[in-house]
Amino acid sequence: MSNKFYLSVCLLCLFSGLALPSFGDERSGPSELPREISDTFNRGKTGLGDLISDEIFDSIGDIDVYQVKFSDFEGQIRMGRKVLANHDIEESYTVIDRVQMPVYLPVLSVPLGTEVVTFNIGLGSGLDFANIRVVKPSGALSRERLLESLEQKTDLVERKAELESSDWYEEAKKTFGSADAPYVDGSDGSEDKPVYLMDSLRRARYGKLWNMVSGPLALPFKASWLSHFTPNEVTTYGGYGSVEIGVSAGYVTNISSGFFEQLGLTAGVRAYLRGNFQISVKKSGTDKVKVKLMRRNDKGVGGSAGIHLPVNVYDGFLLAGSIFGQNFNVNVGKIRESLIPISFTADKVWGKGFEIGYEYDLKDDRAIEAYEQAVLGRFALSEELSVLPESPVKNIFRKEFTRKTTSREVTVSLQLINHKGTSIFAIEDAVVQFPDGKSHVYKATSQVMARNEADFWILKLNEQISYTVHADFIGALPGVPQTQAQGAGKLALLGMIVEGQIEDNYTGGDELNRYSEMLEHLFGIENMFPKVPEYIKIVSKRMPCYAGDECRGVEPEGGDESWQFTHYGRSQYYFRISFTEAQLVKFLLTPREKMWADLERGFERRPGVWKNVTSRRMLSASFGWFGDLLAWAFQIKDIDRGFGFKFHRASVFKKKWEKLQQLVEAGRDDQGSITLTAAQKLKLAKGIGEMFSDRAFTYELLNTTMFALREVNEKEISYQINAQSAAFPSLNLRGGDITEIEKASQKYEDETNFEIPRIRQDVTLGVTSLKIKQTAKLEFQVDYLAVRNPPLVMIRLDEVSSFLRTQRTLRRMMIPNRGQFHEGANTFIIKPSSIPGFEAELASAIRPGKNYRLTIALMDEANAGMPESEDFYVNPNF
């Protein structure tokens, strides 16, 4: 987004959702780049057409197709589409198409005393349908075609002797090649491809628009209807019913102002009971499908408050700004717009329910019959078949759970500028019966999101930053006898997984540098991303003389010089960090005398400002309960210049830190080592979840944790970083090993929560420790570690330019694993060869004196693992 947008957003600083870190006044400064290089920077970036495309998509994201409202009845039909980036090597997106049909029936509405306060009773119900699928670029390689060709190839190999005598043997040999022949997309590298493939985003947004209705409503009640589903495609359908009791209040007063005519205040509280029923269907393979039933009863309480202002915008009100580096003026004219500058809602929900899931092998008629009953909510036949040996129906899990969710939302609207901050803290405590045993699963999830938006009619500028923290415990059941507690504790897994995303559809140079610095600061890695120019010098050309003979031989003079802010189009950053139990224990055992110093670094305070006892007492006295109230109510942004908001939140975090330290110390034995029981690990998971549930300063708390671990030389933290921008080549960075808590957590999510849209990179298909070493002029040794034996390997070779920060995709290929890839250490040699194979295919695109990036990802029939990239230079003098 443009810099002018941030000037406007300053008006909202008191009510923003997430505190963005500041990095002093260091800026990359102006850059005087030649015009042709400036044009290269702009190649592939988001232009006006893409911004208008964003506006169009936002307008269809949530549509009221039909609405009816009477005095005693209100109903709607709503449909919408949401698109989520998967951050994978295939550059794919998850598309969620949804149709909702809510109905509300007010039963009683009685004024209390005056008309200001009203007592309400109402009934609600509704139906909810969703379709979730993965969309890839139009030129994406087809796993289905590859696996089909592999089956054909296997048949040919088995009949080799017979086929060699056939007339078409030579043609078949050319077609299938060697056993290791890759499936290549045919790119010869002649076309520059932008880092961020807008093709896949457009396909996700606008492809199959009819699927917004047909997808969610085309329910696969017959097994044959699944033929149009793609692997991993999910459809869900269900309903709910609720009863609600509440009190609402509203007050309006006149204002003697030419701009604001009235001021309205609203507030309300409510309590409700709600029952939910949902069936989810997932095509898990060519002939396999999973079906899940969920039933849950909720009880909740909530409140809301808002300020309502009808606004007059007079004739001649002029909006001026700088978009695309050019001034524009928009005469708004006289309009009357009703808006709510500030609204706040909060809810707390307690739920209890059960889930059950089955997998059906549709090659068996018994499974087909059981499936067609299950999608109608009848699971008796599925249960009967699942207990039989060699059954085509398998019971994959049973789960009983309790769930407590606290949510909060703040919205600030000022004419064209909008801010929305959302925070959700959910605790799920479940007992799950898997085929291999029963587990106790505790998950504390904190999710915070801040979205800033500027709507200029024909285009919309969006910036969104979100963090999700999962504190997970997966292990023994409560109530294990004490004699078995130590053994159960060893089997129990404790960990914390953090995910963060930054998305900006129109990124300025200063914003891009700020995003990059946030991640570099967090991971403690300098120059992880290139610093980009924030503005460039532009020299305009003067028009030549066309006045006749007097202009003959006269060259036009030099044009005017101007500075133009750089814009790098759409950018996305994603990171994932996994902390093991040992790392969390190291963090919690930080000496108390060092905690304030780590918090100062994490919250980017001047060293010693919080360590000083007198300073802490003054901040605590001036901003104790009042700071807590404001931070809780409005999620205060980074305005801590002489105030105590950050200090107050840091002090709350420190108290929880010290409390959990005592819990860890309780597990220390006489020899000084720490061994935690399953019950102690469960308490730690609960405490860590609450410790990191801060609504406004998740980034700072995570910063503190990383600083503290780096101080004790903890270097094996597992992390993944994916960054995409038109300003620099796509980056995929990994560090550390895949943790056991990641594997266990993914198994739990994939089996029990497959209908929840999220980034679905399979951690069990991970690649780590990728290294490339030149061994001859055009020969390279590639070493990497594979977490498990993969059916397929995808390799992408890009030519990169560090000066122009451009990237060309030269080769993309899928390679079938016929024994050459395996779990653990792998090595292959890239070198020219007359024998067909992926090594020779890669070597054919490499030239001396060039810089390249090799990216490897493991894949199976439906999932892609987390990619790993490594840059290398081809030394022509080797």
Image (cartoon, rainbow, N blue to C red):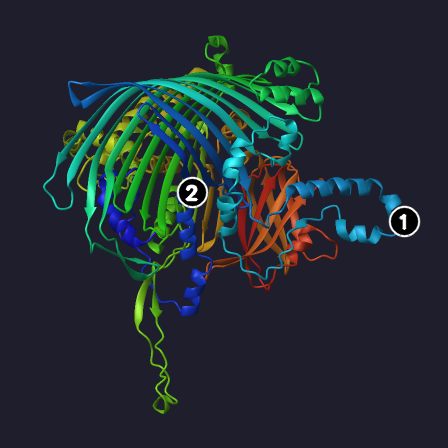
On the image, the x and y values in percent for residue 281 come to 56, 27
| 607 or 11, nearer to the observer | 11
Relative vertical location of residue 543 with respect to residue 467 in this rendering, above or below? below
State which tag comes first along the sequence, 2 or 1. Answer: 2
Q: Would you identify the image quadrant in which residue 644 lies?
A: top left
Mark 2 residue crowding within 10 angstroms, few (<14) / some (14–19) / many (20+): some
As helix, strand or loop, the secondary structure at mark 2 comes to: helix
Image quadrant holding the C terminus, namely: bottom right
Q: Which residue is most to the bottom? A: 549
| 326 or 74, nearer to the observer | 74
Mark 1 residue type: Ser
Left or right position of 346 against 156 = left
As helix, strand or loop, the secondary structure at mark 1 comes to: loop
Tell me the residue that label 1 is attached to: 165
In the image, what residue occupies the spot 55% across and 35% down? Answer: 762
On the image, the x and y values in percent for residue 164 come to 87, 48
Left or right position of 808 against 18 = right
Tell me the residue that label 2 is attached to: 60
| 252 or 236, nearer to the observer | 252
Label 2 – label 1 distance at C-alpha: 60 Å
